[in-house]
Image (cartoon, rainbow, N blue to C red):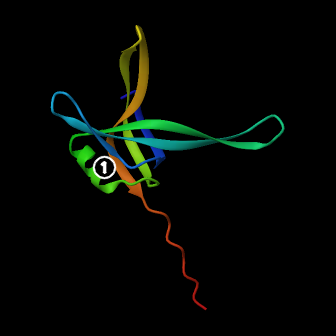
Amino acid sequence: MFNDITLVVNLASDPERVSLKNGKSYVKCPGINNTSFKDSTGKKFDEPLYIPLHFYGVIGDIAFEDLLKGDKVLIKGTLKMLKKEEKGNFKRYYYIAVQHFEILKPKEEEVNEI
């Protein structure tokens, strides 16, 4: 597919379950991906990018139970657009519909034996 996305993100909050009018639900959670760049003077800046993540079905149930704020997660999914009408104007909201995720564990510190 052309709109497949693979990202490593840190979760900005605990996952939240959202119920829809039709009785179904999904789980949403913002992910943060940091971008680093240097300005013309050579000063380094970090710019956080907040990415809305939506988990559906069984993956949503697993995400709701297993994911916590601060977790580093490998996300695979597709880019989706939601069009909402607000005050007579249409606004577009983009999010990632997660199809697979993996919690990344930090490297265990090596123990130096003397």
Residue designated by label 1: 63
Where residue 112 sits, quadrant-wise, is bottom right
Q: Amino acid at mark 1?
A: Ala
Residue found farthest to the bottom:
114
Q: Determine whether, in the image, residue 42 is placed left or right of residue 51.
A: right
Side (left or right) of 98 relative to 42: left
Residue at figure coordinates x 40%, y 31% from the top left: 95
Give the residue drawn at x 81%, y 34%. 40
Q: Which residue, as the protein is rendered here, is positioned at the far right?
A: 41
Q: Nearer the viewer, residue 25 or 46?
A: 25
Q: How many marks?
A: 1
Q: Is residue 103 above or below residue 40?
A: below
The extreme left residue here reads 23
| Residue nearer the viewer, 62 or 21 | 21
Residue at the spot 58% in from the left edge and 43% down from the top edge: 34
Which quarter of the figure is the N terminus placed in?
A: top left
Which residue is drawn at the image coordinates 54% and 81% (left, top)? 111
- Is residue 20 shown above or below 84? below
On the image, the x and y values in percent for residue 56 come to 26, 38
Q: Position of residue 3 (x, y in %)?
A: 40, 28
**Residue 107 appears at what percent x and percent y?**
50, 66
Q: Nearer the viewer, residue 26 or 96?
A: 26
The residue carrying pointer 1 sits among few (fewer than 14), some (14 to 19) or many (20 or more) residues within 10 Å by Cα, namely: many
Residue 6, image quadrant: top left
Measured from the top left, where is residue 97 in percent x and y? 34, 34
Q: Is residue 9 left or right of residue 21?
A: right
Element assignment for label 1: helix
**Name of the residue lying farthest toward the top:** 88
45 w.r.t. 85: above or below: below
- State whether residue 63 is above or below residue 49: below
Q: Which quadrant does the C terminus fall into? A: bottom right
